[in-house]
Amino acid sequence: MSEPRPLPSPGDGVPEIIADAIRERTALEPVAGIVLGSGLSSAVDGVKAAARDGAVELSYGELPGFPPPSVAGHAGRLWIGEVGDRALAVFQGRVHFYEGHGMPMASLTSRLSAQLGARTMVLTAAAGGLDPSMPPGSLVVLRDQINLMGVNPLIGWRMPDGSPAFVEVSEVYEAGLADAALASARTHADDGLVRDGVYVALPGPSYETPAETRMLHGLGGTVVGMSTVPEAVAARALGMRVLGLAFATNAAGVQVSHEEVMQASKAASETIGRVLLDLVETL
């Protein structure tokens, strides 16, 4: 039997401390971590309804070292339960780089999921549309990403031997999971509102100017947001499979407020919840 592949870490010990606290509350070992982005927390409702007895739900404030959310639309709760024979860890809200946290914290959901034993990450996010041909309200299954956050999520990470965390990212988002999600989404939503594409990550928290929107689309971006990339890169560094689902809350280049993003995201939660249930057996 081959030895497990050594994994990198930023060395802060935070996921280990939080995982110990979670294990005091539940013996469930999730096969997947699921992150619900801005306004998407109600996507967990369908998962909860299909779950067996014995699920637990913890506020981030109960988890030592887990930053409380400061962004509207992020419930700040972790639900762990079983759907069928699969235990899932569902994060209702994430930690953002623009909140003033470093990249190790911005990738905490992936790091904690891996510490709990999960081998797959599902990352959802509200995002802005970049492609003028894409109608607002579209669900975009991610195939690739462009990191324009100004820093690589793995800076400071080390392998056990002290070397830098050189990680291969030619396929951040697993093609098989993306294919399955695309097929599922098209059974639950208007086909014209479902597509695949590329996520562009900016540091935020300001939204994009019209000129920036045109530039980002010209670079190959489909949607733009302020999250996801730190979690996706960290998950790949930890040997996890990654699925990305972005909900385009607005058309390219139009004015938008955070309140409007929240309102639009709620409409996508039901579709995302159904896709998650369809994919449980593949996670």
Image (spheres, grey):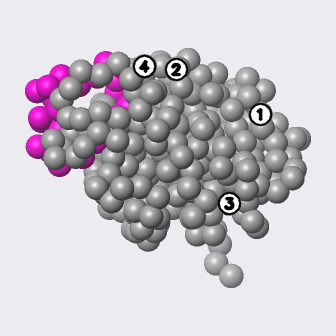
Q: Vertical placement of 279 versus 89: above or below? A: below
For marks 3 and 1 on the same chain, the one whose residue lies earlier in the sequence: 3
Name the residue tied to disc 1. Answer: 58
Residue 131 percent location from the top left of the image: 18, 44
Distance of mark 4 from mark 3, alpha carbons? 33 Å
Name the residue tied to disc 2. Answer: 71
Residue depicted at 40% across the width and 27% down the height: 261
Amino acid type of disc 4? Glu
State the image quarter where residue 247 is shown: top left
Name the residue tied to disc 4. Answer: 259
Crowding near the residue tagged with mark 4, few <14, some 14–19, many ≥20 C-alpha atoms within 10 Å: few
Q: Is residue 173 left or right of residue 157?
A: left
Amino acid type of disc 2? Val
State which mark lies toward you, 1 or 4.
4
Q: Vertical placement of 265 versus 29: above or below? A: above
Q: Which residues are magenta?
A: 203-227
* Rendered image: mark on residue 31: 3
Q: Is residue 175 left or right of residue 123?
A: left
Is label 3 in a helix, a strand or a loop? loop
